[in-house]
Image: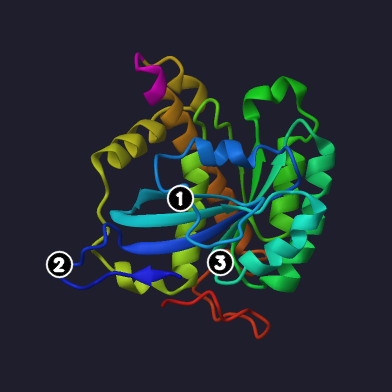
């Protein structure tokens, strides 16, 4: 599924194609994450997808166009068998819970067990949804972050309603998935930073998250800067954790013996 388009004059409008699964219990807002992504195909390319939401979107990652096939495998118990089928060929998995529902966070352990059994070695990240309802929070950021580190995952709290950290979480999982497939060598030195990326780096390096709110900027740009700052903060924490204990956050390492073979470059 992870496709590389190098041919001159290629007609495909993307450089890489990745298949991601969104898993988690019912009513955690996985459909909200999909609806907030930029327009793409919403009809599944495969038949018999009752209970499965599907969407495609394309993101720009380090100067490369990455097309994502996003599959919401539902959270009802009877769809665990569907997850087992659709996990074949997946390059990344988003484990989604609702920060206002402790029960949905506790259910993540069951989904990790499913992943370890049916999709071992596939990169995954933990996503706490509905950050805009933090006043009703039942799962603390520290608790979720600790759980993510224990299970070798990156961690994001997001809000589709506020367009906060959603694209960043998909971008981070894409980065890990591509490196997991050996794409670091493909990128080489031709990594291109957008003007927006350069500006964000400069601003974030010279102020704090609270200072961003005081800048005379449009609300949409302020929101993006805060999301960018928190995303990089998360990445720094993950990198510091790499030196202590890590399995899949260093994706260029040789896969373990039990790692599934479907997550390869085609």
Between circles 3 and 1, the one closer to the viewer is 3
Q: Is residue 232 visible?
A: no
Tell me what residue is drawn at x 35 percent, y 31 percent.
203
Which label was assigned to residue 186?
A: none
Q: Which residue is nearer to you in this view: 39 or 91?
A: 39
Between residue 141 and residue 209, name the one nearer to us. Answer: 141
**Magenta stretch?**
216-221
Q: Of helix, strand and loop, which one carries label 3?
A: loop
**In front: 235, or 73?**
73
Compared to residue 44, the image places residue 130 above or below, namely above
First-in-chain label (2 vs 1): 2
Residue 32 falls in image quadrant: top right
Residue bearing the label numbered 1: 171
Callout 2 crowding tier (Cα within 10 Å): few <14, some 14–19, many ≥20: few
Based on the displayed image, in which of its 4 quarters is residue 84 positioned? bottom right
Residue 78 appears left or right of 250: right
Q: Quadrant of residue 83?
A: bottom right
Q: Residue furthest bottom?
A: 257
Which one is earlier in the sequence, the residue at label 3 or at label 2? 2
* Left or right side of 124 for 26: right
The reply to whether dot 3 and dot 2 touch (C-beta < 8 Å) is: no
Colour style of the rendered protein structure? rainbow
Location of residue 170 in the rendering, given as x and y in whole percent from the top left corner: 50, 49
Label 1 Cα crowd, 10 Å radius (few <14 / some 14-19 / many 20+): some
Instruction: State how far apart marks 2 and 1 are (Cα).
Output: 26 Å
Q: How many angstroms separate mark 3 from mark 1 (CA)?
A: 16 Å
* Residue at position x 34%, y 74% in the image: 185
Q: Residue 90 shows which numbered tag? A: 3
Q: Are marks 2 and 1 in contact (CB under 8 Å)?
A: no
For label 2, the residue is 9
């Amino acid at each position: 599924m992870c496709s590389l388009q190098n041919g001159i004059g290629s007609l495909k409008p993307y450089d890489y194609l990745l298949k991601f699964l969104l898993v988690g219990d019912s009513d955690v807002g996985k459909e909200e994450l999909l609806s907030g992504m930029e327009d793409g195909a919403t009809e599944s390319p495969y038949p018999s997808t009752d209970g499965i939401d599907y969407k495609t979107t394309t993101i720009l990652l380090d100067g490369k166009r990455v097309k994502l096939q996003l599959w919401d495998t539902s959270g009802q118990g009877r769809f665990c068998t569907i997850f087992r089928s659709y996990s074949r060929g997946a390059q990344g998995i988003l484990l989604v819970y609702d920060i206002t529902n402790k029960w949905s966070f506790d259910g993540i352990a069951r989904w990790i067990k499913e992943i370890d059994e049916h999709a071992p070695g596939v990169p995954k990240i933990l996503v706490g949804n509905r950050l805009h309802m933090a006043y009703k929070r039942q799962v603390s950021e520290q608790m979720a972050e600790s759980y993510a580190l224990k299970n070798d995952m990156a961690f994001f709290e997001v809000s589709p309603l506020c367009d906060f950290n959603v694209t960043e979480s998909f971008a981070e999982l894409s980065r890990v998935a591509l490196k997991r497939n050996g794409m670091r060598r493909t990128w080489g030195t031709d990594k291109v930073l957008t003007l927006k990326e350069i500006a964000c780096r400069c601003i974030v390096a010279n102020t704090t998250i609270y200072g961003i709110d005081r800048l005379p900027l449009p609300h949409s740009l302020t929101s993006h800067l805060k999301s960018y700052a928190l995303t990089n903060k998360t990445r720094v924490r993950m990198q510091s954790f790499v030196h202590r204990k890590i399995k899949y956050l260093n994706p260029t390492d040789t896969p373990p013996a039990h790692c599934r073979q479907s997550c390869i470059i085609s």
